[in-house]
Image (cartoon, grey):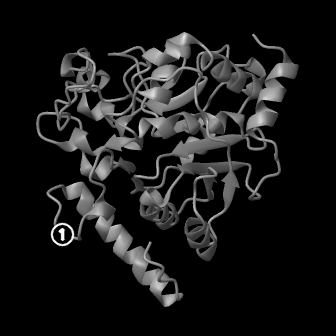
Amino acid sequence: MASDGSANAAVSAANPDRNRVVKSKKVWTTLITNTAYLPGLLALDYSLRVAGSEYPLIALYTDSFPAEGHAALDARHIPKKRITYLVPKMSSDFSNDPRFYDCWSKLTPFSLVEYERVVQLDSDMLVLRNMDELMDLELDPPSMHGTGDRVFAASHACVCNPLKKKHYPKDWIPANCAFTTQHDSPDEAQKSGAPSTAGLAMPNGGLQVVNPCAEVYDLILDQLTKESTASYEFADQSMLGDLFHGRWVALPYTYNALKTMRWKGVHDKIWRDEQVKNLHLLLSPKPWDEKPGESEHETHRWWWDMNSKRLSEEKKKGIEDGF
């Protein structure tokens, strides 16, 4: 365990300005590095408000985020905070999935000690039902320094590889998926996640519920200096599953409902449209990269329905910047 001094130094380097950018001590955050994901972020923010969340969304931006992106956030009064781009000492080759190069920075919320609770969301998510209860979910307090069994909360990663991507690990098969273990108990799957040790025991990094803690962040940074990071094929979520194996809270799929799970033969045995709280529109193309109505995916139509309402409201306010 690192000393308190080194842990706080690590947080100071990652988070030099610890003034809260909003009054709330509990916040949603999302990472943004470019404008390619900006329509997703804007729809995410809008969907949180439509769902009646009491908590604000903060955009965590890196230096690569351009001026037109800042103008779009400012026009919509979305609070933002600059963060440093996080990279490990040794990284896997993510050329088959370049999105993973940015994913290390999704570990930054562990360093945001000015907040009591941070729920990190991917910007390709859409909130369909209020999930403010995540702000009060029981997790280990920061005083435990990452030694407990409830360090953070997340839903499992689906390791079925339904698109049969050749560069995915050989053990990414339905038989090794935590969600497969719930096929015989679909009612329970709406309320509880499979144990965090089920399947390949990997969390999906799209939604992370965190009590920020300097010592936990220092553990993460220390892990990122090790040669083993080169073996982490799925970046942040591989690392979290390894570093905190069996010591995280597994949420039901409803909080991070991967659109692929809805497909027939994947996890349609547990998926229920009316139970989904947070839809994750992972993989390409994204809904905003398509024309309305041209997608074969029903879930993309849900995004377009929500986004069209956002655009209509913004037009009334004189916001028409193309995002």
Q: Is residue 51 above or below residue 25?
A: below
The residue under label 1 is 293
- In depth, the one of 190 and 250 nearer the eye is 250
Q: Is residue 280 above or below residue 158?
A: below
Residue 299, position in %: x, y? Answer: 25, 55
Name the secondary structure under disc 1: loop
Q: Is residue 221 left or right of residue 177?
A: right
Q: Is residue 271 visible?
A: no
The crowding category of the residue bearing disc 1, from other C-alpha atoms within 10 Å (few below 14, some 14 to 19, many at least 20), is few
Q: Identify the residue at image location x=76%, y=28%.
A: 214
Residue 146, position in %: x, y? Answer: 68, 18
Q: Is residue 108 above or below residue 317?
A: above
Q: Quadrant of residue 175?
A: top left
- In depth, the one of 46 and 83 nearer the eye is 83
Task: Give, as a three-letter code, the residue at label 1.
Answer: Gly
Quadrant position of the N terminus in the picture: top right
Residue 116, position in %: x, y? Answer: 73, 40
Residue that sits furthest to the left in the current view: 265
Q: Is residue 89 left or right of residue 304?
A: right
Q: Quadrant of residue 65?
A: bottom right
